[in-house]
Amino acid sequence: MRVVFVHGACVRDGSWWWHRTAELLQERGMLSVAPALPSCGEAGLPGGVGGPGLSEDVAAVRQALLDSDEPTVVVAHSYGGIVTAEAAAGVGSVRHLVLVSSYLPEVGQSLSEFGDGSPAPFLDIDSDAGTFSVRPELLVDTFLQDCDPEIQAQAAGHLARQSLQVTGQPVQAAAWQQVPSTYLICAQDRGTPPRLQREFARRAGNVVELDAGHHPFLSQPAAVQDLLLSL
């Protein structure tokens, strides 16, 4: 069994965001990969108007899934659930989806449909450039309040400005409708409120709740490892 990690919005260097959990899994003989998302500028192309969007992110994750026939668990965080819904559809090696504080969109739904219609206060949106990002001064208090100081200090260096177009682009498939799924609710999440997560989780086959913030794979990696090994 292997794990493919799909990171969330406005960050880069997926292997860093997942490293604490990935290292524990490797000790147990389970390898993982964290594909780069082009819309976050990880493909060497500038984000924004005319740059890579959801389809390019889907293609990158799908390629990572097709690179091996080994049975695979896909772990998607936040925006990563939008990408995974389409990328994992019809891939025979994918045995389970784990959605961490994430979204399970129906075919035709986009990320913007999961909000309340107004921009989140922790986002910096540049409509002219066609990009958005997390406000660095709000990063820790919103997303990493339960992480240790070392992680909090390093995280800002792994933020990215992402193409704004991904928020309105609809998915063309919904893998969670065919593949067994588990939703991990983060009960102390200040970015995606737990009440919304519980609504999203209704579409999943199984639901687990953890007393953690938005990034449990950094703050409580052993708990996330145990969940993945249980699958």
Image (cartoon, helix red, strand yellow):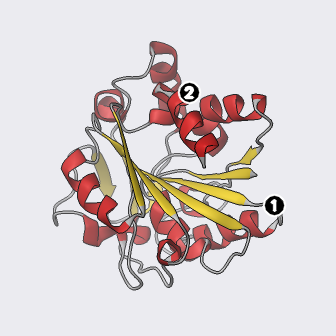
Where residue 43 sits in the image (x, y, percent)?
Answer: 68, 59
Question: Badge 1, how many Cα within 10 Å: few under 14, some, many 20+?
Answer: some
Q: Residue at x 40, y 64 (%)?
A: 204
Classify residue 141 as left or right of residue 79. left
In terms of depth relative to the viewer, which is nearer, 180 or 52? 180
Quadrant position of residue 25:
top right
What residue sits 76% from the left and 34% below the top?
26
Residue 165, relative to residue 158: is it above or below? Answer: below
Which corner quadrant of the image does residue 168 belong to? bottom left
- Indicate the secondary structure of the residue bearing disc 1: loop
Under tag 2, what secondary structure? helix
Residue that numbered label 2 is attached to = 222
Residue at 60% x, 72% y: name it.
Answer: 87
Please give left or right for residue 158 compared with residue 95 in the image.
left
Q: Considering depth in this image, is 137 or 213 the residue closer to the camera?
A: 213
The residue wearing badge 1 is 70
Q: Position of residue 100 (x, y in %)?
A: 44, 49
Question: Earlier along the polypeptide chain: callout 1 or callout 2?
Answer: 1
Q: Is residue 141 left or right of residue 180?
A: left
**Percent coordinates x, y for residue 5 in the rendering:** 62, 50
**Residue found at the far top of this picture:** 149
Task: Confirm whether residue 114 shows in the render.
Answer: yes
Q: Is 26 on the left-hand or right-hand side of 163?
A: right
Three-letter amino acid code at the position of disc 2: Ala
Residue type highlighted by circle 1: Glu
Please report the residue visible at 69 percent of the width from the left and 75 percent of the height from the top: 91
